Image (spheres, rainbow, N blue to C red):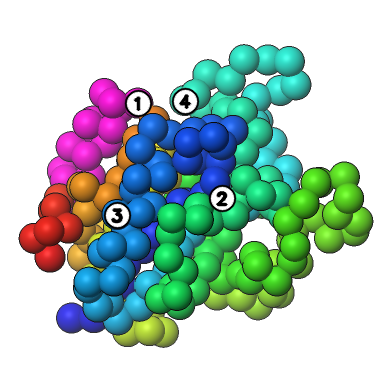
């Protein structure tokens, strides 16, 4: 078996101080870095929300987000909010997958290989013609294609948020035929009840739930 660690959306906007802060996000980033220092994976990939115009995923101007289907603007491509959190050690990360340019993009399996750090972050109005779409090359592989090329059959999933992008990524990973383990001490959720339900749903679909200490 060859195993990959998939780090879901450990981005500034999903951590304390961000526009869609998830409680425990910064600590999750730090704990994932400790795991990376102690444990060898055959491949390590991150996903990032990389929104350009995701339609009604962002609540309309002046409307209250419902925090279920509509959200405050977050992780806009080429802004500091879309960058990985500074507590996440990036040395061992092999590839980044960007998702949600024009959709809600909950699942990492919607992501395509990209180079988000090739373009500087700043204020959206100063970005000129490059809205962030150039971070993904024309023929870039999606996450599934990349994992198969790496010979990966086993996924360990950590990150944010348990009840949304972690959930969607895990369910799609199972659907695609991978063995999937959720590292339950390395995830953070938006809503406590929804996160507990999401863990049940992932387990029912065939995911293993494991503490990273037991790896
Ligand atoms: Zn989003």
The answer to whether the beta carbon of the residue marked 2 is less than 8 Å from any atom of ligand 1 is: yes
Secondary element at tag 2? strand
Sequence-first tag of 4 and 3: 3
Vertical comparison of 169 with 24: above or below = below
In this view, 42 is above or below 127: below
Q: CA distance from mark 1 to mark 2?
A: 19 Å
Of pointers 2 and 3, the one earlier in the residue sequence? 3
Give the mark toward the camera: 4 or 3: 3
Q: Which residue has dot 2 on it? A: 49
Residue at 80% over, 55% down: 131
Q: Provide residue 190's location: percent of width, then percent of height.
A: 39, 30
- For residue 191, which numbered disc appears in the image? 1
Q: Quadrant of residue 128?
A: bottom right
What quarter of the picture does the C terminus occupy?
bottom left
Question: Which residue occupies the extreme left position in the image?
Answer: 214
Spatial distance from mark 2 to mark 4, Cα to Cα? 16 Å
Cα distance, mark 4 to mark 3?
Answer: 27 Å
| Residue located beneath label 4 in the image | 68
Residue 188 on image: x %, y %: 33, 40
Mark 4 Cβ inside 8 Å of ligand 1: no
Badge 3 local density, few (<14 within 10 Å), some, or many (20+)? many
Q: Residue at x 22, y 71 (%)?
A: 38
């Amino acid at each position: 078996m060859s195993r990959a660690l998939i780090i879901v959306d450990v981005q500034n906007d999903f951590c304390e101080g961000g526009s869609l802060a998830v409680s425990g996000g910064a600590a999750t980033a730090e704990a994932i870095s400790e795991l990376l220092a102690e444990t060898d994976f055959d491949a390590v990939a991150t996903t990032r929300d990389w929104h350009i115009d995701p339609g009604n995923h962002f609540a309309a101007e002046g409307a209250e987000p419902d925090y279920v289907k509509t959200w405050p603007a977050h992780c806009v491509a080429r802004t500091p909010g879309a960058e990985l959190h500074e507590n996440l050690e990036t040395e061992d990360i092999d590839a980044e997958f960007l998702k949600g340019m024009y959709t809600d993009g909950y699942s990492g399996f919607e992501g395509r290989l990209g180079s988000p750090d090739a373009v500087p972050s700043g204020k959206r109005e100063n970005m000129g013609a490059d809205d962030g779409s150039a971070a993904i090359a024309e023929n870039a592989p999606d996450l599934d294609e990349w994992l198969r090329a790496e010979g990966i059959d086993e996924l360990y999933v950590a990150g944010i948020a348990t009840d949304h992008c972690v959930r969607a990524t895990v369910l799609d990973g199972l659907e695609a035929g991978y063995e999937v383990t959720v590292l339950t001490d390395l995830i953070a959720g938006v809503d406590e009840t929804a996160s507990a339900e999401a863990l049940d749903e992932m387990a029912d679909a065939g995911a293993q739930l494991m503490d990273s200490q037991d790896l």
